Image (cartoon, helix red, strand yellow):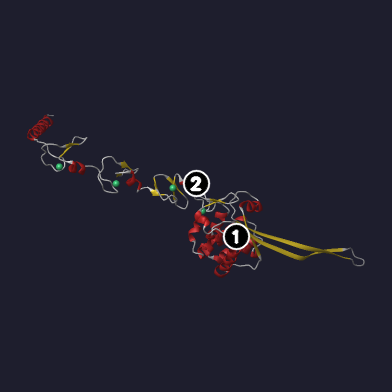
Amino acid sequence: MIRIKSILSMLLFTVAIYAMAATLRCSNCKKRISGQYLKSSSGQIFCGSKCYKSILPKCVVCKKRYNKGFVSASGEKYCSKKCLSTTWKVCDLCKEHKPTGIITHNKVFFCATCAKLPKCFSCNEPDHCFKLSDGRNICHKCKKTAIEKEFEAKKLLQSVRNVMRNELKLFTDNKITVRLVDQATLSDIAGHSDNRELGLYRYKCTYTTVTETKKRLFHKEEKSTSIKNKKEFFSVLLLSHIPKKKMIEVISHELAHDWMQAYYPNIKDIKVKEGWAEYVAHLMNSVYGQNFMNSRMENNPDPIYGGGFRKIKAIADRDGNKAVIRYLEYCNK
Ligand SMILES: [Zn+2]
Ligand SMILES: [Zn+2]
Ligand SMILES: [Zn+2]
Ligand SMILES: [Zn+2]
Ligand SMILES: [Zn+2]
């Protein structure tokens, strides 16, 4: 107690001496002040505006000192909204720095205003979209390579078919009819209206049967039916306005169904059918150098398409493509 008291009295003494000797000094340069001086709100005094400004906070962007500034969410200080905005993300659409918005599954940033625009049916990103006659919206980016005409679709299918034959050795000689259709037609033929279908492979087979009756003496009549005429129809329906890269993937998927129909027609398990088609589309994306599109299948939560794909892919990764064929043979029994 005695010790604390003596320290306290010493301290008071020092302050008193300082106060007696004090003349006004600038808080920054420590020079003596005579005449006019500046006083800050916190009570500091300065010889002039240069010294006064030197204690002001510095903007982290332009490095200028400022009086009233802006503070970012992370606590950094900026002289102006303009400097603060340089830390905001650039909206992919309006190209402006904006503080709030959304990041799409493609990891693209859109500001809150642009995020409200109609979304493209293909890439699902907002844009000042074009409206198609069936009500779908398509963005400028996707429209650039969209397959709009049936002859383009036919040409592309033929070229994808050639690549698949050469690169993956998967082919049939089936005469495939190609049709480019709108959303309503595709949903109608597919038999459901979830509007997720981008393509459809169809196989139809018709038989003409002939029944012969044999009459023999002392015997009952014998009837025998035989197939005289077997007709097969192969067709691929493609949704119009799909961008070219995506269309290559969709066509590959449908051609994989055609191959399976030719070699393993007894497979009924839809997970094997769709898994195989997705697996072939995945391989074709790699052949075309568009591997970035493969994460969709890899992460597809759908148990049939995603689950089926991952099952086939796991067999291929573990034991190679020959093991995949052995698996298809087993499923075909
Ligand atoms: Zn000074
Ligand atoms: Zn600044
Ligand atoms: Zn924007
Ligand atoms: Zn798009
Ligand atoms: Zn399919």
Q: Which mark is residue 117?
A: 2
- Horizontal arrangement in the rendering, residue 292 relative to residue 267 (left or right): left
Three-letter residue code for mark 2: Leu
- Horizontal arrangement in the rendering, residue 283 relative to residue 19 (left or right): right
The residue that mark 1 highlights is 149
Q: Is residue 285 visible?
A: yes
Front position in the image: 183 or 321: 183
Height in image: 46 above or below 170? Answer: above
How far from the left and from the top, in percent, is residue 141? 49, 55
Report how many numbered discs are placed on residues in the image: 2
C-alpha span from label 2 to label 1: 27 Å
Front position in the image: 16 or 20: 20
Q: Is ligand 4 less than 8 Å from the beta carbon at label 1?
A: no
How far from the left and from the top, in percent, is residue 147? 57, 59
Q: Is ligand 3 less than 8 Å from the beta carbon at label 2?
A: no
| Lower position in the chain sequence, tag 2 or tag 1 | 2
Front position in the image: 38 or 272: 38
- Horizontal arrangement in the rendering, residue 228 relative to residue 18 (left or right): right
